[in-house]
């Protein structure tokens, strides 16, 4: 599996952008993106020349469109052809989403709480969603330095509410990128985890029932030049299909800095974000011997008595990769907080010290961080920051607390908190891992 840096919300001259597709692709490549989605307002005509531009900049361009209406903006990507957005009334957006799915695409709420009329007509989401299961993702971060903005905090809250209600919805960032302008603000990146070529699916997938609709197909001849569609070349179509599938399944991590990833492990099985821990494992962990007198985050290696508890427990493996898009973002050296959030609230908070590795200090950081983590009861699973092999990676491992029997955990995500540009804020977050339960408590 490989994480691809994506920008999923962009515009060109074909709507209200002030850049050509070529200029956009060039800018995206300079910022270290491996893929972009072109989401012009109500048109897909900006995709002309896509195949050549992809080759020139080594970038995947996912066809998309932003449905732009009085009742809200909806980003749709991965469509095989133009979906008619004009039919969607305020109370039948579900029909529109179904049409997007029928055409092999996925749909997300764009900047749902951005101020609406008269500043930006329809920017505020007012559609009445009948079935939240149909919504593939919510763009919880919009614009640059998104985590500090009030409307994005509300969008993040909406996503959390829907997870708490039992829906499985992905969360992304989107710059809503209109022009090649310099910015001092942190740029956010949506990382999508794609399957390697010829590789099989990793953890149990949370694919929605309609995931079979992602077959590459061509644009309708009347609406778009044939060359711009998915399937224009088989390699490009495959890349698009993999990215769309990753987002559909919630294999997503969003950041303004390092790449944060999370996997859960129990009894030798592994689940990554977007996948579901089966009911038998959730139940086994819940019935494990009480661990309340054992520090939750300390592994009890070598202690015979703890073996059965160890086998039943769920361990969380967190990883911070500071080497991604090197030189294209900066954060001060600091002790970050790695937090685990679920429907039960904040479950764990671990210190994650980061010191940008400088050649003369290689090795020192590792010793320091390891000592600090040991003192705080969190054991790095592998040598941390500053080793020769992995100079900019920090791995942490902890045991998940056992939830009370009457309040099962239904989802879990990781968040990285720290200081950026003087503000204490979310730096990164993963999408959720879900937990199945026998009674189906977490499913609607
Ligand atoms: Zn918009
Ligand atoms: Zn837009």
Image: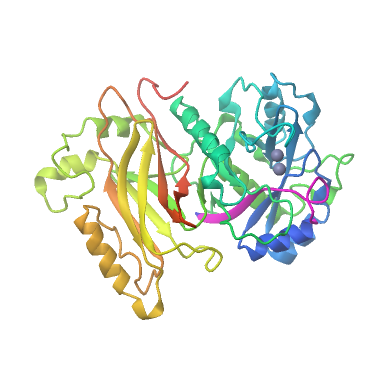
Q: Is residue 197 visible?
A: no
Residue 304 at what x, y percent from top left?
10, 47
Q: Is residue 436 above or below residue 376?
A: above
Residue 166 at what x, y percent from top left?
46, 26
Ligand 2 sits in quadrant: top right
Q: Is residue 47 above or below residue 383?
A: above
The question of residue 163 being in magenta is answered with: no
Residue 38 at what x, y percent from top left?
72, 48
Residue 404 at what x, y percent from top left?
25, 27
Q: How is the image coloured?
A: rainbow
Q: Which residues are magenta?
A: 2-20
Q: Is residue 158 visible?
A: yes
Residue nearest the viewer, comparing 340 with 395: 340
Q: Is residue 364 above or below residue 184?
A: below
Residue at image location 35% in from the left, 76% down from the top = 362
Location of residue 132 by image quarter: top right
What residue occupies the far right of the structure in this picture?
222
* Residue 197 in the figure: left or right of residue 39: left
Residue nearest the viewer, comparing 193 with 411: 411
Residue at image location 61% in from the left, 31% down from the top = 210
């Amino acid at each position: 599996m490989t994480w691809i840096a994506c920008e999923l919300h962009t515009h060109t001259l074909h709507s209200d952008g002030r850049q050509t597709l070529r200029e956009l692709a060039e800018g995206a490549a300079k910022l270290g993106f491996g893929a972009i989605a072109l989401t012009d307002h109500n048109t897909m005509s900006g995709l002309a020349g896509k195949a050549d531009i992809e080759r020139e900049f080594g970038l995947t361009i996912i066809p998309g469109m932003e449905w732009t209406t009085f009742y809200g903006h909806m980003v749709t990507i991965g469509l095989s052809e133009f979906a008619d957005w004009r039919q969607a009334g305020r109370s039948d957006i579900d029909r529109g989403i179904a049409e997007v799915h029928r055409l092999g695409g996925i749909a997300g709420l764009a900047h749902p709480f951005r101020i609406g009329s008269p500043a930006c007509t329809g920017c505020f989401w007012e559609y009445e969603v009948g079935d939240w299961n149909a919504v593939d993702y919510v763009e919880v971060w919009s614009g640059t330095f998104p985590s500090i903005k009030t409307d994005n905090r509300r969008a993040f809250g909406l996503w959390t509410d829907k997870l708490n209600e039992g829906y499985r919805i992905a969360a992304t960032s989107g710059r809503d990128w209109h022009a090649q302008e310099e910015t001092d603000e942190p740029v956010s990146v949506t990382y999508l985890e794609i399957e390697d070529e010829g590789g099989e699916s990793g953890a149990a997938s949370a694919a929605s029932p309609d995931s079979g609709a992602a077959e590459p197909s061509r644009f309708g001849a009347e609406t778009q030049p044939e060359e711009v569609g998915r399937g224009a070349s088989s390699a490009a179509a495959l890349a698009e299909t993999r990215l769309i599938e990753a987002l559909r399944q919630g294999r997503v991590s969003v950041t303004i800095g390092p790449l944060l990833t999370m996997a859960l492990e129990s009894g030798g099985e592994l689940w990554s974000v977007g996948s579901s821990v089966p009911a038998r494992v959730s139940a086994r962990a819940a019935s494990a011997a009480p661990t309340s007198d054992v520090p939750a985050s300390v592994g009890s290696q070598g202690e015979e008595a703890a073996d059965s508890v160890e086998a039943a427990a769920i361990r969380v493996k967190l990883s911070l990769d500071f080497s991604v898009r090197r030189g294209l973002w900066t954060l001060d050296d600091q002790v970050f907080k790695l937090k685990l959030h679920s429907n039960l609230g904040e479950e764990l908070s671990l210190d994650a010290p980061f010191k940008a590795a400088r050649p003369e200090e290689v090795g020192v950081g590792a010793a320091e961080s390891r000592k600090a983590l040991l003192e705080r009861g969190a054991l790095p699973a592998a040598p941390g920051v500053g080793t020769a092999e992995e100079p900019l990676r920090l791995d942490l491992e902890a045991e998940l607390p056992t939830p009370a029997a009457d309040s099962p955990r239904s989802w879990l995500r990781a968040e990285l908190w720290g200081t950026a540009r003087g503000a204490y804020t979310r730096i990164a977050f993963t999408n959720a891992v879900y937990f199945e339960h026998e009674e189906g408590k977490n499913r609607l």
